[in-house]
Amino acid sequence: MPLIDVTGLRHAIAGRPVLDIPQWSVEAGRHCLLLGPSGSGKTTLIHALAGLKRPDGGRILLDGQAVWDLDAAARDHLRGRLIGIVFQTLHLVAALDVGQNLHLARWLAGLSRDAGAVARALDRVGLGNRLAAKPEHLSQGEKQRVAIARAVVTQPKLILADEPTSALDDENCALVLDLLLEQAEVCGATLLVATHDERTRARISDRLDLPKLSPVTEAA
Amino acid sequence: MTTLGLAWAYLKRTALTTCLNVALLALGTGTIVVLILVGTQVQDRLAKDAAGVDLVVGAKGSPLQLILSALYQIDIPTGNIPLSQAQALASDPLVAQAVPLALGDSFRGYRIVGTDPAFVALRHAQVATGRLWQAPMEATVGAQVARAAGLKVGDQFNGNHGLSAGGAVHEGMPYTVVGILAPTGGVVDRLVLTPIDSVWAVHDAHHHHHDGDAEEHEQVTQPPPEREVTSVLLRYRSPIAAALLPRRINTGSAMQAASPAAEMTRLLSLVGIGTDTVRGFGLLLVASSALSIFVALYNATQARRYDLAVMRALGATRMRVSCLLLTEALAMGAAGTVLGLALGHGAVELAGRLVPQARDMGITGLQFPATEPYLLVLAAGLSVLAALVPAVQAYRTDVSAVLSRG
């Protein structure tokens, strides 16, 4: 059974179609790169998969469950349990320290408190010593790594990364992509990277599938 | 991680705003607590001091002044009445008991009251040490007087002329303490009780001393003045007396009769206007704090839109993010109310210890009126109300739109 199974997915913004995917599926453990310019529907697809944006039509099965047939609370629970998301703006909760940001993710996913899991997630991204640091005291690169650790600390089956490298220099771009792939492998999760950053293609396209999704990949 | 823990982290993040909101609510709640505590205790005290006395008879003047001076010992008397008329009242068939009072002197600001031993039973007092007065210039003192002046049985003291401290000392006519009353929490605690004869004797000597020179010159022999008392406390023999006796005294004699119940109702309605104003002010403070909490949470919701959206993306339900804001409001409400309760009780207790008038009234902050839990309910209700709009906003947030805007 594929982890992601999309059928007849379509969505338009202000009358302009941004998603039109007759059929697309991703097996568990496979990784995908969704490459396309801004406005090509990548974020809409990510949000539709995550149950954050209801598409105009079509069906999304996530780990066998029809995301948009669930009620709102069940959809939230499914997202918390199955998906880890890395946002373009990273956005860590400033009121909480690094460790608490990871605990928050586990708590919202309905998982029990596990200081070991949090410490291990931070260790894996090289920030084991920044557990008590506040986000405002982190560099951009460190924030990116914390955001990745937050996405994987719940042991998700699917990691969605929306423009994870667009604000990074070449060196950090490479580091983040490597880290994302590495963490996805460690978790046994499927990684879906949506980006317009051409550096990504050069860096990791040989390790990711490049699905032909119209109009996303048409634009690419 | 818990909702409360997360709410606490956010409240800490905006510590100054949080503290200001809590302080505002605490001030409002504290004001109301002080009013409730003092109001309740003063009313209880007034009712307790009036218990058992149906009517007060004294010289014509303000009936409220008569009640305050004779019953509560907190105002100057309206004048004196002839002893013969007071005695006539005692033998009236409508009267079950008549206790005369003769005022005029004080000891360290505590009033010396010439009266019958029946007064002690009427005011539900008991002797703790020694005995009741029997002979002139013997005194049985209230618990507070004994404590404040360090008096014990066998001690002697001189009275001062007048009802407040600082009057001329009646030298050569000392009172001897023969007993100390147990504390009652009432007006008796603040009195020095002695036979009426003592009061007359002290004043006879006082007048003799001051009039001595004039008499030597004028060589005029005046008849001894008729004995007077200041007032009489009455108990009715039957309910019918309430309808007949006051009217008869007020219209058919040079005295006036005043009902403690009626005068206290009038007094409390007068005082009530002021109390209501302060209570209104307290409620205004509480309402202001609710408004302030609303503004703080509304702004917080705007500032934290991305935080809330990220939490939703991490799996938080709409209800959970709404609950977070409600929890923050409730935490501020609870903190403000608890602090206000502590402030109110603390202020009243402090006043009860430091302010002489409050101490005399037995005011304490260690009472917990049954109405206080309603304050918590009020604060909780207002807090939820204040958080309602921000919570609904958070509930309705279009997560995808917020995350897309970045």
Image (tube, grey):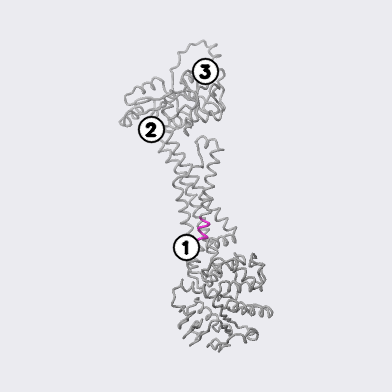
For the residues beneath circles 3 and 2, the answer to whether they share a chain is: yes
Residue A106 percent coordinates (x, y): 55, 69
Look at the image and give the residue range highlighted in magenta.
B327-333
Q: Nearer the viewer, mark 3 or mark 2?
A: 2
Which amino acid is tagged 1? Answer: Leu
User: Looking at the picture, how far across and down is residue B172, in whole percent?
Assistant: 56, 17
The correct choice, above or below, for B378 with respect to A90 in the image is above
Q: CA distance from mark 3 to mark 2?
A: 34 Å
At 47% across and 74% down in the image, what residue appears? A75
Residue at image position (44%, 73%) is: A71
Q: Which residue is mark 2?
A: B259
Q: Kindly identify which residue carries mark 3.
A: B207
Q: Chain of mark 2?
A: B
Relative horizontal placement of residue A176, taking residue B364 as reference (left or right): right
Left or right of A77, for residue B253:
left
The CA distance from mark 2 to mark 1 is 52 Å
